Image (cartoon, rainbow, N blue to C red):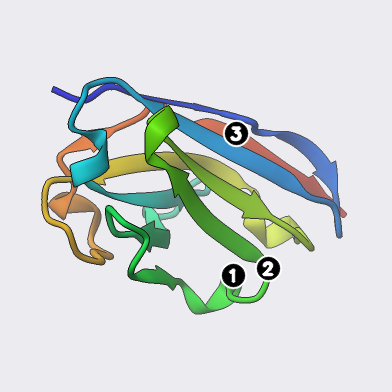
Amino acid sequence: QVQLVESGGGLVQTGGSLRLSCVASGRTFSTYAMGWFRQAPEKEREFVAAITWNAGRIDYVDSVKGRFTISRDNAKNTVYLQMNSLKPEDTAVYYCAATRLDTILKNAWLYNYWGQGTQVTVSS
């Protein structure tokens, strides 16, 4: 079992920055690929970014490329999402997720474990 706990969300103005963190329990964290997803009100959960276990592969949804950066520290069982140049359309609940498959996955249903989510609100 892996438990995931996100933090770092909040209210920020357009153009601002936030860094989300996701801490995982369990000694096998380093073998999981990790992803960040988001869900805005009345919208489906959307892939944001993913990173393989050794950060050898990383991918982003087009709308955040150049603004968001995913990274991980396996020694700390933590994955991060640095979000810069935030826009109102980035407003959503952000979730981190873990998958036993060490590859980039963009479908939410392929992930095995999920955090509870952290709210990000970008004001215009």
**Residue at the spot of label 3:** 119
Please state which amino acid type lies under the numbered disc 3: Gln
Counting from the top left corner in percent of width and height, residue 104 is at 26, 66
Report, in whole angstroms, how far the alpha carbon at label 3 lies from the one at label 2: 18 Å
Give whichever of discs 3 and 2 has the lower sequence position: 2
For mark 2, does the 10 Å Cα neighbourhood hold few (<14), some (14 to 19), or many (20 or more) residues? Answer: few
**Residue at the spot of label 2:** 67
For mark 3, does the 10 Å Cα neighbourhood hold few (<14), some (14 to 19), or many (20 or more) residues? Answer: some
Give whichever of discs 1 and 3 has the lower sequence position: 1
Counting from the top left corner in percent of width and height, residue 54 is at 31, 56
58 horizontally vs 70: left or right: left
Report, in whole angstroms, how far the alpha carbon at label 1 lies from the one at label 3: 17 Å
Rendered position, 92 above or below 77: below
* Label drawn at residue 64: 1
Please state which amino acid type lies under the numbered disc 2: Arg
**Label 3 near label 1: C-beta < 8 Å?**
no
SS at badge 3:
strand
Residue at 29% x, 20% y is 25
**Viewer-nearest of labels 1 and 3?**
1
Q: Residue furthest front?
A: 75
The total of numbered circles placed on residues is 3
Rendered position, 98 above or below 106: above
Residue at 28% x, 65% y is 106
Residue at 49% x, 53% y is 71
